[in-house]
């Protein structure tokens, strides 16, 4: 199993990025500096920070020239004032764990004493003082006390602040917030000078897990209080989360006004470094290296070599990630002088090779839908190992149980949950047969690269086609129900499709349902494919689900039937089950359009209705030539 946490083992070939950032922190010309390490959630930002920290420690083992501190933003989520919490945490870490600051504990205590920003923050909230905009850029955002408060109110605020600071007289006419920031920055800068270090590197992680308010407070703490000479801050965050937080705190004044978020980020982050999204081949290699990490020996110092390091050195030496080469078992074998059980921490060689083979085949399919995300890759493997362990308990006497089939079914579950559930229904319906005939049909057609017939058009997606052609290819000949039993938490057939819609998809779905004008909902349905922000198939599935419950939505099925031929079979199944009283002159026009779009395919629906006694005048309208 793999925990959802950072690693000091570079399975993602991030060492060049780590080396780059380490070199930047050693360049005295580039401080004070704030680096933005941008990457999507799960992209490996925390692991990259660990690699940088490791490099810095190796560069200065004494910790007297380069001091590296790691802070987790999420830890401060519950504080009233995250700014003061972060600043105090940094100072206490310097006092408790850093040799360079061993003789400066009194100065640190004095500075911690000066940070009573919890009270100062409460004072600001109490009086509604706009802390940030009065300090971050006074030239452009002059939100000072003198502009916003009366003389009496200003005196009241100053008295509160004097009690908090308990240090020196503060003149009323002075911008108090800026003065307090200046005092702290000076004392913090003096502390670093006395330590005689070359640079203080502060890594701030997990910022994209925090609320928008905490994101802003953390950025402000860095910019206003802590960014002084001989400091480098590395802030790991999803850039989109940061932009959202800024827009949430400082929304546009008018629709046409300038977006403030980009300017704000530019003022905070001097050097943005983006972690590129991993390619499909990168993710395949990552999945396989995770398997290697699970089995290969990590070594015992002075006794046994670290076999994983040997393999990773081979990966780096051959530029596997740079050249876009997929790792295979022969490559793994070539990394070792002696390839046998001695290289393993657990299990036998044949067990390792079998697992490597299963994940190797599955990775060809699963990599395409993990969106270059290492965390999702770990989660897939963790889910597989959990189900594998359950299978070993449930089916320990079943020698026919094939873990490759389990892995392939899980890949389908990740690719398209609706098709996964459809295959489950096929498996149930074909229990008495030797084969799952529907799966056999679409597998053979896909293997020949032919076009799927209308009733199976939902399986024509490129990822699904790759899944159908992947090993084990003879899935239709297997008893899949025992494998589905291990995935039954995903098979709640009673769960509504609309419940799985995202925010943007739900808005479109509701707009279609609520629309009364045919021209409006028809256009919405026709244009669904063009909207790149949604998964349009989920909306269409939800619409058909609603149609099954409410035949009054028949007219809205007309544009769906005409524009999306892959859904015709499912719509026709619903039409055949409708009561004959629901097929009338009011709905005949919509049905006529469906008939005209697909006369041969619609003939079985017409036959079903005529067998039930459909009125001739209604039938004439449906089959009339336009």
Image: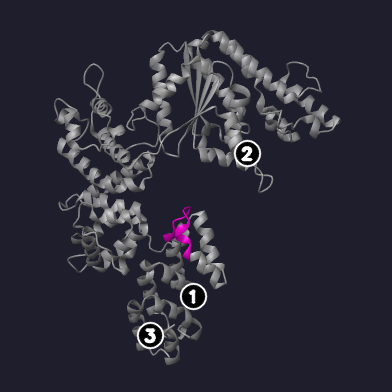
The label nearer to you, 3 versus 1, is 1
Q: Earlier in the sequence, mark 2 or mark 3?
A: 2
Instruction: Say few, some or many: other residues with alpha carbon within 10 Å of mark 2 (under 14 / 14 to 19 / 20 or more).
Output: some
Instruction: Say few, some or many: other residues with alpha carbon within 10 Å of mark 1 (under 14 / 14 to 19 / 20 or more).
Output: some
Residue 376 placement, left or right of 352: right
Q: Which disc, if any, is residue 555? A: 1
Which percent across, then down, holds residue 82?
A: 60, 31
Q: Secondary structure at mark 3?
A: helix
Comparing 176 with 169, the one in front is 176
Q: Earlier in the sequence, mark 3 or mark 1?
A: 1
Which percent across, then down, holds residue 286?
A: 31, 37
Instruction: Say few, some or many: other residues with alpha carbon within 10 Å of mark 3 (under 14 / 14 to 19 / 20 or more).
Output: many
The label nearer to you, 2 versus 3, is 2
Comparing 192 with 559, the one in front is 559
Q: Residue furthest front?
A: 626
Q: Which disc, if any, is residue 609? A: 3
Please name the residue that numbered disc 2 is placed on: 260
Residue at left offset 36%, top offset 45%? 370
The colour scheme is one colour
Q: Which disc, if any, is residue 494? A: none
Task: Determine whether 551 is above or below 3 in the image.
Answer: below
The answer to whether any part of residue 78 appears in the image is no
Q: Secondary structure at mark 2?
A: helix
Q: Quadrant of residue 432?
A: bottom left
Q: Magenta span covers which residues? A: 526-537
Q: Secondary structure at mark 1?
A: helix
Give the CA distance from mark 2 to mark 3: 61 Å
Residue at left offset 47%, top offset 59%? 499
């Amino acid at each position: 199993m793999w925990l959802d946490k950072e690693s000091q083992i570079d399975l993602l070939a991030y060492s060049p990025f780590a080396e780059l950032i380490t070199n930047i922190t050693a360049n005295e010309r580039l401080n004070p500096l704030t680096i933005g390490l941008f990457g999507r959630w799960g992209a490996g930002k925390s692991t990259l920070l660990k690699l940088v920290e490791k490099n810095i420690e190796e560069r200065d083992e004494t910790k007297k020239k380069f001091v590296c501190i790691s802070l987790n933003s999420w830890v401060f989520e519950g504080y009233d004032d995250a700014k003061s919490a972060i600043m105090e945490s940094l100072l206490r870490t310097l006092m408790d764990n850093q040799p360079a600051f061993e003789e400066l504990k009194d100065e640190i205590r004095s500075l911690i004493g000066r940070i009573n920003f919890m009270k100062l923050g409460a004072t600001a909230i109490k009086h509604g003082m706009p802390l940030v905009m009065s300090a971050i850029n006074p030239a452009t955002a002059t939100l000072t006390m003198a502009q916003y408060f009366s003389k009496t109110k200003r005196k009241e605020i100053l008295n509160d602040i004097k009690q908090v600071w308990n240090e020196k007289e503060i003149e009323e006419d002075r911008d108090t917030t800026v003065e307090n920031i200046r005092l702290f920055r000076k004392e913090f800068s003096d502390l670093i000078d006395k330590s005689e270090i070359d640079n203080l590197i502060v890594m701030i992680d997990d910022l994209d897990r925090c609320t928008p308010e905490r994101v802003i407070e953390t950025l402000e703490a860095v910019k206003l209080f802590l960014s002084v000479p001989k400091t480098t801050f590395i802030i790991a965050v999803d850039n989109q989360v940061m932009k959202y937080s800024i827009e949430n705190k400082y929304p546009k004044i008018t629709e046409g006004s300038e977006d403030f978020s980009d300017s704000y980020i530019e003022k905070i982050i001097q050097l943005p470094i983006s972690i590129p999204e991993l390619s499909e081949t990168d993710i395949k290699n990552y999945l396989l290296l995770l398997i290697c990490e699970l089995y290969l020996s990590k070594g015992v110092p002075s006794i046994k070599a670290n076999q994983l390091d040997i393999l990773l050195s081979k990966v780096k030496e051959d530029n596997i990630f740079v050249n876009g080469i997929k790792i295979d078992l022969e490559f793994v074998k070539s990394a070792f002088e002696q390839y046998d059980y001695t290289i393993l921490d657990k299990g036998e060689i044949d067990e390792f090779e079998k697992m490597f083979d299963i994940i190797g085949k599955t990775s060809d399919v699963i990599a395409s839908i993990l969106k270059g995300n290492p965390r999702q890759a770990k989660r897939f493997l963790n889910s597989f190992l959990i189900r594998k362990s359950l299978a070993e308990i449930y089916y320990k006497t079943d020698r026919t149980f094939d873990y490759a089939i389990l892995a392939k079914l899980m890949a389908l579950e990740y690719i398209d949950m609706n098709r996964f559930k459809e295959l489950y229904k096929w498996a149930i319906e074909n229990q008495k047969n030797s084969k799952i005939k529907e799966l056999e049909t679409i597998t053979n057609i896909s293997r020949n690269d032919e076009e799927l017939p209308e009733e199976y058009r939902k399986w024509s997606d490129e990822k699904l086609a790759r899944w159908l052609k992947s090993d084990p290819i003879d899935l239709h000949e297997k008893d899949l129900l025992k494998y589905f039993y291990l995935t039954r938490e995903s098979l709640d057939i009673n769960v509504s499709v609309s419940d799985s819609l995202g925010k943007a998809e739900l808005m479109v779905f509701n707009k279609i349902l609520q629309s009364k004008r045919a021209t409006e909902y028809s256009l919405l349905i026709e244009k669904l494919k063009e909207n790149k922000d949604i998964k349009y198939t989920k909306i269409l599935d939800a619409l058909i689900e609603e149609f099954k419950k409410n035949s009054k939505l028949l007219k809205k099925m007309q544009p769906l039937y005409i524009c999306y031929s892959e859904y015709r079979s499912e719509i026709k199944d619903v039409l055949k089950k409708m009561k004959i009283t629901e097929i009338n002159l009011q709905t005949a026009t919509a049905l006529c359009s469906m008939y005209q779009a697909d006369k041969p395919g619609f003939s079985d629906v017409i036959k079903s209705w005529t067998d039930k006694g459909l009125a001739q005048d209604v039938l004439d309208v449906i089959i009339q030539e336009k």
